[in-house]
């Protein structure tokens, strides 16, 4: 890698909400999880969020004031403070302005256009005040709340050295919410009335401007939260009036599926559910079902499938289909529980069904994250019949908890749920194609019939759903590829892996299979005559580590025992000439010893022959190994092939084996060597 590409990648991730500080939907989950995955992959990340008064006091008390300044917004100059907090290893900067953010809820006020125009402008101004010398390379904005930041950056800050470095990425989480306002806002709040290019690219009709349209036109790259949704929003049916702009910029439009926090959403360790469970042991799942049935006032029955919804009660979430088909579902023996808030008509209808079907229908018209987790864990099926769904996180969380999703094939639901195939057994849930109540009802009962009639297939399907990997790792890799495409001069700086270091420090911990693979790879095609396969492979390993050769060189075992005391007082031989002299002396001593031993053996044999002429086979047998041991300088074959001693004797085997091939008759390979290395000498 060149020097120009060694600069670390710095990302500012701007979002109107981020879990656990503030969350109203999927955007909060994404902003709470994706930065962790980006950092783990090697990027440096700062997350910017408004400092809402609804943030828990335990977090507010930990924030540290960094700086404050004034933000020009049209004819206004608004105060902006930056509050710093490091949470779970991620740096957060909270934009402080009580006039805009001291509200009971993040959105839904008459001045939202002004509030989030201020937030976008404050993000741009804050790039000059980032802590610890953080210089932004990528500004990643999300949804309409931060959509004006790429516009401001181009129109007001272009030409300044600090901002010339910044590249912008804009993510569309839900194209239905675009930030459309009267064109009065263009000049009075945005201050862009006199900029013809900006006015032209922000106008969505003769009297209105569109924040999201501005981001689509001004950003360097555009992403959305699933590949299917990226295709759908380029059509008039799903584009919500922006399909033309997205088709024009489709060359920079990318669909990247969201992930979920697999650590927090893990049934094996989740403290919020009644009992832990996993793929290997699903006992706790039944306990969770019983507990949630009791909590919601449903009949405690394990023979009835429990289907739940955790959702906003809106048409987009398919509530029209639910209202059409709910009576049929309840009459068919399926228990239903719904958690969420939304349109009054849907809320009232759910309460009515609860009163008509006591013990079988439960409606909780509230926002309760803890209860939603218990419902994910205790249910058998999760219903999500959305009219459109950019990505959806609920279906992935449900699968993580072994609750099979029933979804409509749209957007991210189509990308994340594989429909059950009754012939092959493949799948992770159930799906239907058309926005039709009868089709949805048929799909619900197709799932229910599998639950009732084929429990073994149901368990297999649950296991397949729980085995899916919905972590942020793969998604973060795609985002980082996009970032580095925009900033090729940057690189990722991952923490150094300890795996290789550990392997070097403890080579003996390598498994037998790995040693065998290394031996097979290092061994030559033909084993030299007079040398075993074990010695050959060990020699090749030693050749790869020349520094280990002097320490591993040994004399014969017998000679080692006789000269141990002498060798303790010897100094290491560092000169090659000294090593040759030592070798010659050793060979001379060994030759004398061998000659004396042979003479002594011959004398003994002569005396025995004169005393007794006839010698039986039993008397001759002990003499053979003694002769072999004393008449040959080669090491015993059992020493060469012994597994624990192989590293110590392999060098000697190479020396003696090579010389013995010139003067001795080749011997057959031992059966031990053949078994240990899968082959014998071919000679």
Image (spheres, rainbow, N blue to C red):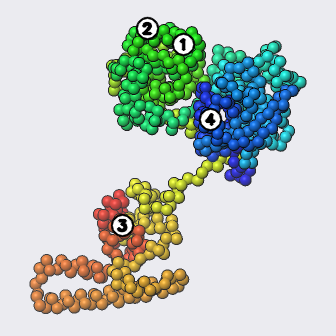
Q: Which residue is mark 4?
A: 57
Give the distance between the C-alpha atoms of the residues marked 4 and 2, in whole angstroms.
Answer: 42 Å
Give the distance between the C-alpha atoms of the residues marked 2 and 1, in whole angstroms.
Answer: 15 Å
> Mark 4 near mark 2, Cβ–Cβ under 8 Å?
no
Residue 631: name its quadrant.
Answer: bottom left
- Mark nearer the N terminus (4 vs 1): 4
Q: Position of residue 194 (x, y in %)?
A: 89, 24
Answer few, some or many: residues within 10 Å of disc 4's Cα (few below 14, many 20 plus, some between 14 and 19). Answer: few
At a point 41% along the width and 56% down the height, the residue shown is 511
- Mark nearer the N terminus (3 vs 4): 4
Answer few, some or many: residues within 10 Å of disc 3's Cα (few below 14, many 20 plus, some between 14 and 19). Answer: few
User: Disc 4 or disc 2, which is closer to the eye?
Assistant: 4
> Mark 4 near mark 1, Cβ–Cβ under 8 Å?
no
Q: Nearer the viewer, residue 427 or 521?
A: 427
Give the distance between the C-alpha atoms of the residues marked 3 and 2, in whole angstroms.
Answer: 78 Å
At a point 27% along the width and 90% down the height, the residue shown is 599
Give the distance between the C-alpha atoms of the residues marked 3 and 1, in whole angstroms.
Answer: 75 Å
- Mark nearer the N terminus (2 vs 1): 1
Q: Which residue is mark 3?
A: 644
Q: Nearer the viewer, residue 614 or 14?
A: 14
Callout 2 secondary element: helix
Q: Nearer the viewer, residue 591 or 491?
A: 491
Answer few, some or many: residues within 10 Å of disc 2's Cα (few below 14, many 20 plus, some between 14 and 19). Answer: few
Is the C terminus in the top left, top right, bottom left or bottom right quadrant? Answer: bottom left
Callout 3 secondary element: loop
Q: Which residue is mark 2?
A: 356
Q: Which residue is mark 1?
A: 347
Can the viewer see residue 256? no
Q: Position of residue 151 (x, y in %)?
A: 79, 29
Q: Position of residue 206 (x, y in %)?
A: 81, 13
Residue 649: name its quadrant.
Answer: bottom left
């Amino acid at each position: 890698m060149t020097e120009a590409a060694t600069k670390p990648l710095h990302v500012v991730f701007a979002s109107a909400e981020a879990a656990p500080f503030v969350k109203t939907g999927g955007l909060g989950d994404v902003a709470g999880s994706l930065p962790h995955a980006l950092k783990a992959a090697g990027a440096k990340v700062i997350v910017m969020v408004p400092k809402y008064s609804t943030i828990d006091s335990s977090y507010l008390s930990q924030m540290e004031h960094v700086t404050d300044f004034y933000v020009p917004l049209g004819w206004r100059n608004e105060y902006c403070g930056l509050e710093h907090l490091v949470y779970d290893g991620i740096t957060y900067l909270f934009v402080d302005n009580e006039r805009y953010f001291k509200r009971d809820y993040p959105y839904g006020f008459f001045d939202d256009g002004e509030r989030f125009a201020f937030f976008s402008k404050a993000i741009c101004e804050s790039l000059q005040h980032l802590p610890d010398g953080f210089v932004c390379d990528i500004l990643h904005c999300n949804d309409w709340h931060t959509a004006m930041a790429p516009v401001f950056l181009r129109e007001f800050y272009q030409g300044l050295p600090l901002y010339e470095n910044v590249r912008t990425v804009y993510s569309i989480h839900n194209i239905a919410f675009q930030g459309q306002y009267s064109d009065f806002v263009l000049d009075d709040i945005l201050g862009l009335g006199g900029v013809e290019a900006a006015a032209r690219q922000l106008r969505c009709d003769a009297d209105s401007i569109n924040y999201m349209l501005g981001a689509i036109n001004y950003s360097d790259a555009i992403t959305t939260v699933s590949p299917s949704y990226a295709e759908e929003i380029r059509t008039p049916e799903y584009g919500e009036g922006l399909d033309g702009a997205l088709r024009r910029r489709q060359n920079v439009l990318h669909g990247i599926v969201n992930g979920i926090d697999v650590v927090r959403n893990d049934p094996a360790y989740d403290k919020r559910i009644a009992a832990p469970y996993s793929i290997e042991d699903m006992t706790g799942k039944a306990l969770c079902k019983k507990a949630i049935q009791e909590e919601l006032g449903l009949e405690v029955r394990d023979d009835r499938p429990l289907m739940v919804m955790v959702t906003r009660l809106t048409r987009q979430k398919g509530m029209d289909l639910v209202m059409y088909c709910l009576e049929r579902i309840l009459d068919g023996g399926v228990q239903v529980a719904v958690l969420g808030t939304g349109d009054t008509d849907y809320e009232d209808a759910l309460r009515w069904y609860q009163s008509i079907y006591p013990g079988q229908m439960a409606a909780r018209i509230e926002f309760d994250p803890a209860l939603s987790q218990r419902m994910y864990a205790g249910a058998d099926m999760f219903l999500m019949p959305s009219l459109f769904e950019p990505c959806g996180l609920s279906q992935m969380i449900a699968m993580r908890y072994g609750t099979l999703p029933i979804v409509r094939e749209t957007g991210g639901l189509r990308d994340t749920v594989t429909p059950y195939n009754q012939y092959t057994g493949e799948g992770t849930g159930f799906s239907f194609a058309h926005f039709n109540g009868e089709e949805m009802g048929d799909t619900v009962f197709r799932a229910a019939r599998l639950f009732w009639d084929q429990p073994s297939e149901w368990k297999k399907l649950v296991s397949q759903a729980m085995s899916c990997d919905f972590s942020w790792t793969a998604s973060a890799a795609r985002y980082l590829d996009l970032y580095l495409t925009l900033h090729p001069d940057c690189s990722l700086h991952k923490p150094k892996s300890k795996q290789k270091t550990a392997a070097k420090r403890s080579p003996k911990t390598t498994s037998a299979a790995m040693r065998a693979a290394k031996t097979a790879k290092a061994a030559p095609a033909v084993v030299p005559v007079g040398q075993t396969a074990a010695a050959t492979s060990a020699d090749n390993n030693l050749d790869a580590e020349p520094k280990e050769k002097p320490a591993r060189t040994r004399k014969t075992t017998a000679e080692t025992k006789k000269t141990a005391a002498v060798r303790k007082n010897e100094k290491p031989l560092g000169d090659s000439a000294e090593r040759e002299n030592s070798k010659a002396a050793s060979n001379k001593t060994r030759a004398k010893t061998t000659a004396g031993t042979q003479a002594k053996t011959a004398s003994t044999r002569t005396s025995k022959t004169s005393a007794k002429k006839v010698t039986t086979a039993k008397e001759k047998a002990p003499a053979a190994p003694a002769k072999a041991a004393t008449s040959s300088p080669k090491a015993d074959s059992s020493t060469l092939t012994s597994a624990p001693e192989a590293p110590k004797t392999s060098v000697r085997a190479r020396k003696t084996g090579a010389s013995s091939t010139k003067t001795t008759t080749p011997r057959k390979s031992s059966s031990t060597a053949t078994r240990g290395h899968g082959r014998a000498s071919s000679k």
